[in-house]
Image: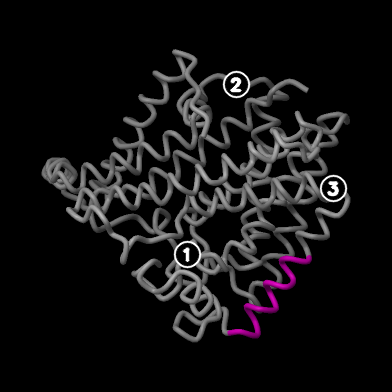
Amino acid sequence: MKRLMSLDILRGITVCGMILVNNAGGRYSYAPLRHSVWNGLTPCDLVFPFFLFMVGISTYISLRKFDFRPSGEVIRKIFRRMFLIILIGIGIGWFGHICGGDFLPIDSLRIPGVLQRIGLCYGVVSLLVIYVNHRYIPWIAVGVLVIYSVLLLTCNGYNCDDTNFIVIADRAVFGQAHLYTKSPIDPEGLVGSISAIAHTLIGFMCGKLLLENIPISKKLLYMMVAAVVMLLLGYAISGWMPINKRVWSTTYVLVTCGWASVLLAVLIYIIDVRQLNKGWTFFLVFGMNPLFLYVLSEVLAIVLSHSGMKPAIYSLLASLIPDEYLASLAYSVIYCMVMGLTGFVLWKKKIFIKI
């Protein structure tokens, strides 16, 4: 099967979205660009789960070349990539402390994070699928979500306070000083990664479907059916188990994987079936170097903030754009364009940085 351009486009849209929502210029952002405070779902809440969904698809494509056999080469590759992604995530946090003058933040360095969760989910899912028959993967994903749902419902999983079992477990593993400080719940903590692993497995199953030797029309039909089932189930039980990004609730997994499947199916139809593949370059360049551009955006954001350049640039924009919300968005868009230009240069030179 030839490479689906739509996969790169969706990956690029997702990374671009992650950079956009992480780099508001000022204190104010439009509601769709802010995460839900607790229960609920905003467009901003879709970007990270979409990326994990794509990690699952990419895992299938990558390991398929090795026929999913647990050789020494494959296991080394999995562990190397997993730990590299995790260490880069921790390193970004460390770099922020260094820029603030704390070179050895041993007592305060946050251990969980976005890249750390990506690395962990990639590693666990990769090891799982090379040792377990793939016919059991859907049942494992379902089982994990059911167990996690029971824990959420019986162990104060929807309490945003110290009684939540997620808080208790994460603090026991990492210690309070090494967790997110803006709320009791660390949104990328270890316990929430349980359902995130099931999330990645759903992406893996989507990757398996996409590489099946069946007509693409059937693939799209099956994807849409699966998407509708996940969306209907997720929204139907959300009154009982709210959609919540911070605890990565089961309903959050179902709804975000459902919307990711819908968007991917639409993009496949438009780009790969109808061949309407012009005008996607901006997102394509993000999709070709996704993790590198995300890491670069995080590092540059730290440098701009600690050097005072970000406030200066935003002040200039605010002087030209009186609306603080619009000025903040303008900064985010310009920042994304800078990252896009960097990605475009790499793409033109055929430089694809793999992590």
Image quarter hosting the N terminus: top right
Q: Is residue 213 left or right of residue 95?
A: right
Give the answer, above or below, for where 315 lies relative to 268. below
Q: Is residue 292 left or right of residue 52?
A: left
Marked residue nearer the N-terminal end (1 or 3)? 3
The reply to whether discs 2 and 3 touch (Cβ–Cβ < 8 Å) is no
Give percent across and percent down for residue 5: 63, 25
* Highlighted range, magenta: 143-155
In terms of secondary structure, what is the magenta stretch mainly? helix
Classify 10 Å Cα crowding around label 1: few (below 14), some (14-19), many (20 and above). Answer: many
Task: Indicate whether residue 70 is drawn in magenta.
Answer: no
The residue indicated by pointer 1 is 187
Three-letter code, disc 1: Pro
Classify 10 Å Cα crowding around label 2: few (below 14), some (14-19), many (20 and above). Answer: some
Q: Is residue 314 left or right of residue 298?
A: left
Q: Which mark is residue 134?
A: 3
Give the answer, above or below, for where 127 lies relative to 58. below
Give percent across and percent down for residue 285: 48, 26
CA gap, disc 1 and disc 3: 30 Å
Q: Nearer the viewer, mark 2 or mark 3?
A: 3
The structure residue drawn at horizontal position 49% and vertical position 34%, both measured from the top left corner, is 290
Three-letter code, disc 3: His
The structure residue drawn at horizontal position 53% and vertical position 53%, both measured from the top left corner, is 46
